[in-house]
Image: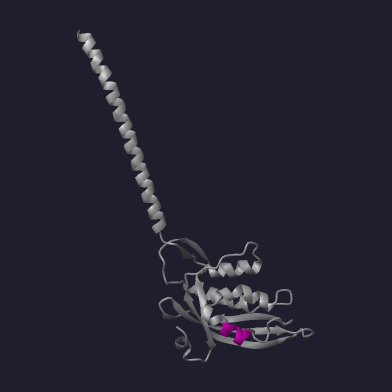
Amino acid sequence: MQTFNTDKNQTNIVPLFAIGTLSLHLFTLLLLMFHGRMLQQVKRQSVPQILVQLADGRVITADAKNNLERDRQTIRRFIGESMTLMLTWSQKQSSTVVWNVTSELLRNDFKREFTERFNNFELESPEENVLVIQKISQPEVISEGKWKVEIFANRLIFSRGDNLGKSIPFNKQILVEVTDEVNSLPNIPTPLNLAAYRLGEARMQIYNICDIEDKSCSDQKI
């Protein structure tokens, strides 16, 4: 009789053990699903990628907090390379092609003014134009996320049959600001597309250009 009762008790424990194990597995599964859902929410709420400034002025994108600060060398490099890119063209790469690609480095409300002041008589022209920079000043803070830089350069314009060309002084105040916009590359990017995109990764844009003597340049556009 004692043996029979012992076997009966062991038989009753087995289904209880199975039910307990199944409940534990279900609890674990629900816990994992809950954690997975929490991770997805955290991922959706994470901050967007912004730039990381390197010591040599180059920038890369990374997950970080948004900010309105830029390294001084990054600002100078952006202005120097952007102006050189926008004001350098040849018969093989016309000013129209250059403008269509590099205009993304300008703020939208400044694009028309830039064209009227610097490209109006040269669009579709056979002339070659090269911007030669002599000096770029250190950035001066205008307000949070905005800077002014003085650039001293010459535009060298070569016409057909004129190998000497002519030099036009280009001494300007360049105003830049932080932007959140980064334009995408086309499916088949050209070297010009890649150069403009690389500059755009600094997340800055030019919003005004004034003569070097203009004392009210910083107040003209906000």
Is 191 located above or below residue 120 in the figure? above
Give the magenta range. 112-118
Q: Nearer the viewer, residue 155 or 24?
A: 24
Percent across and percent down for residue 189 are: 64, 64
Percent across and percent down for residue 14 are: 29, 21
Q: Residue furthest left?
A: 2
Q: Within the image, what quadrant is residue 3 found in? A: top left
Magenta region, mostly helix, strand or loop?
Answer: helix
Q: Nearer the viewer, residue 136 or 170?
A: 170
Q: Residue furthest top?
A: 1
Percent across and percent down for residue 26 are: 34, 36
By what rule are the colours in the image chosen?
Answer: one colour
- State the residue at coordinates (51%, 63%): 60
Image quadrant occupied by the N terminus: top left
Magenta stretch: includes residue 213: no
Q: Within the image, what quadrant is residue 33 found in? A: top left
Q: Number of labelled discs?
A: 0
- State the residue at coordinates (54%, 77%): 106
